[in-house]
Amino acid sequence: MAIPIRNRVFDKIKEAGSLTDVELYKSLTKDDTALAEDRFNKILLDLEILGLIKVSWITKDEKRIEVFVVKEEKDAVDEENKKVMEKDYEASFPGFDK
């Protein structure tokens, strides 16, 4: 089964962390993945819409592409509630002394 081209493009971006569209296109061409420019831009747009990458313009003809990283924020109230619930659950067993 062949890997879809979108996945190959995303894997290249993920390996590099961040790169320009010119570098990515050259890297794909080097790996025998020839793409038309409009198809290449469509794949980048699809990946950006899916929230996997972030594309920003550097110059008129060059774009910077980076992997989009979502940082999870821990809610202090939720963490405290979770600890209390675990403690209550453990205390519900007979003979539990802590």
Image (tube, rainbow, N blue to C red):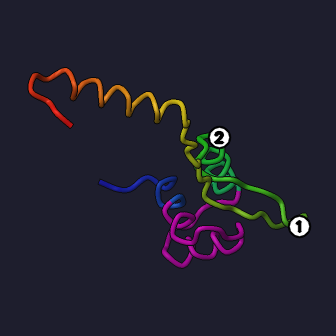
Residue 29 drawn in magenta: yes
87 left or right of 92?
right
What element does badge 1 sit on?
loop
Specify the quadrant that holds the C terminus.
top left
Per the picture, the main secondary structure of the magenta-coloured stretch is helix
Q: Which residue is mark 1?
A: 59
Q: Residue furthest right?
A: 60
Q: Which residue is mark 2?
A: 49
Q: Amino acid at mark 2?
A: Ile
- Disc 1: CA contacts within 10 A as few (<14), some (14-19) or many (>=20): few
Examine the rendered structure and indicate whether residue 70 appears above or below residue 61.
above
Nearest to N terminus: mark 2 or mark 1:
2
Q: Position of residue 25 (x, y in %)?
A: 64, 69
Q: Which residues are magenta?
A: 11-37
**Which one is nearer the viewer's eye here, 55 or 76?**
76
Examine the rendered structure and indicate whether residue 96 appears above or below residue 52.
above
Residue 65 drawn in magenta: no
Q: Amino acid at mark 1?
A: Thr
Q: Residue at x 46, y 36 (%)?
A: 79
Q: Residue at x 71, y 72 (%)?
A: 22
Q: Position of residue 23 (x, y in %)?
A: 67, 75
* Quarter of the image where one finds residue 29: bottom right
Q: Position of residue 94 (x, y in %)?
A: 10, 22
